[in-house]
Amino acid sequence: MLTIFGRTNRFCDGVSRRNFLRIGALGLGAASLNLFDIFRAEARAAQLGTTASTSQHKAVINVFLGGGPPHQDMWDLKMDAPSEIRGEFKPIATNVPGIQICEVFPQIAARMDKCVVIRSLVGATGGHDGFQCMTGYPPKSLAALGGRPSLGSILAKVKGPADPSVPPFVGLAKPTGHMPWSDAGRAGFLGAGYAAFKPDGQGMADLTLKGSSLENLADRKQLRASFDGLRQEVDGSLKSVDDITERAFGVLTSSKLVDALDLSKESDKVRDRYGDGKPYKYQFDGAPTVNDQLLMARRLVEAGVRCVTLSYGRWDSHGKNFDLVRDHGAKLDQGLSALIDDLDVRGMLNDVTVVAWGEFGRTPRINKDAGRDHWPTVSCALLAGGGMKTGQVVGSTNRLGETANNRPVTFPEVFATFYHNLGIDLSNTFINDPTGRPQHLADEAAMKELV
């Protein structure tokens, strides 16, 4: 955090002189990395011509349904299957003729023309984590080099910030008992400088100023004057404040990020439309049903963030699967519908891609505890916005929901579609791994049905 001098010769929090100007790591996961380091790295990258233009702000909101949501109880009901497979739910019509989804999602059904359902997602490794949903690759890919970077980290590298005072990549996932479910998306071989900013925890502490306030710091002249008065108290390493230091203060003096995280600035009507997802049920070691984070994601994108990730609910339904889907599904139905409407009315829906998915599907056969177990063979996803050809279903599974019946869709295809929606040309865009070898962002082309 930023430490401000008091009137005495001592620092307000007692830290050493060489550390008084240190701004914390902003949740980047590197204790020794501060904003000055990041800005200097960005400046060097710009000099080398590796920072792309940020003239157009497109974004992705990645909603991770940690635990593995049951595809056959959400978007791919199997009414012709035996009762031990079919389950308890009935299908309902959507506003797109011929498309039906689970009765738990009536609001999504009314907005299906703005959505895409993928019913045949294949290639899950079976790990209880969000790695493939954040990167498009299996966890072992380039693991010896640090691992594949997530979508948000790649955007931070390739696109940089859309606004100098707003981080390009924000991870909202709250800490979970099973930690892999709260992974915001790793920076991989790109390094901690491209990791997600995490407001929950140290990230927000870094935006809290001791001995001052954002209002007091808004006047740059006043800020400089206060440092001029203190300059005699500081050793030679801080005799001047360069442009990079000024930019670091810009993050703090700008109210954009703090305002975006402050939901009290929204009207009660808007907040009521999203709901808060409470009471949190079936959470155990997973994430809460955080509807307010869906609203926060919209506010962050509006402020300039390029990628927002969050973890929603705990979908590991080995028992009481149908009770869990009624609870989690109804809340997700409300929050996602409000998010789609919100983006649409603000003219942002074509520029913002929304995805809700988990690490794998669940078993066709219902177990003795009225639950479904892990099923990596096939899973599902719901997409919206992004300028895609919406109002359609891509792929199908067989009668029992066991395997992809036609048009299997892979994780790399979905990520290639994200990059297309973001305006990134995959054939001409690469990132160098630590050995200097250029790496593709995705190994397959965007989904032809959607672009």
Image (spheres, helix red, strand yellow):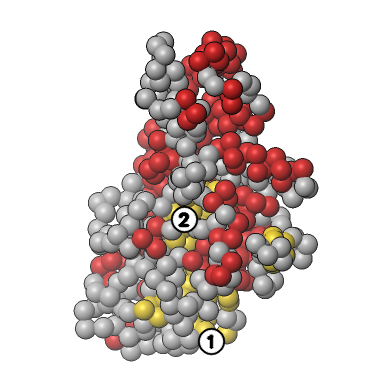
The image quadrant that residue 361 belongs to is bottom left
Residue 354 can be seen in this image: no
Vertical comparison of 392 with 157: above or below: below
Foreground residue among 33 and 291: 33
Q: Amino acid at mark 1?
A: Asn
Q: Residue at x 52, y 74 (%)?
A: 140
Q: Amino acid at mark 2?
A: Ala
Q: Residue at x 65, y 51 (%)?
A: 157
Q: Nearer the viewer, mark 2 or mark 1?
A: 2
Q: Residue at x 48, y 72 (%)?
A: 380
Foreground residue among 49 and 164: 49
Q: Are marks 2 and 1 in contact (CB under 8 Å)?
A: no
Can you identify the residue that label 2 sits on? 184
> Where residue 431 appears, x then y in whole percent?
69, 60
Foreground residue among 369 and 224: 224
The image quadrant that residue 207 belongs to is top left
How far apart are the two marked residues, 2 and 1, measured between alpha carbons? 32 Å
Quadrant containing the C terminus in the rendered view: bottom right
> Where residue 97 appears, x then y in whole percent?
54, 69
Can you identify the residue that label 1 sits on? 405
> Where residue 374 appears, x then y in whole percent?
36, 79
Task: Count how many numbered circles sit on residues in the image.
Answer: 2
Vertical comparison of 218 with 415: above or below: above
Q: Quick one: SS at disc 1?
A: strand
Quadrant containing the N terminus in the rendered view: top left
Furthest residue in direction front, as rendered: 236
Vertical comparison of 405 with 426: above or below: below
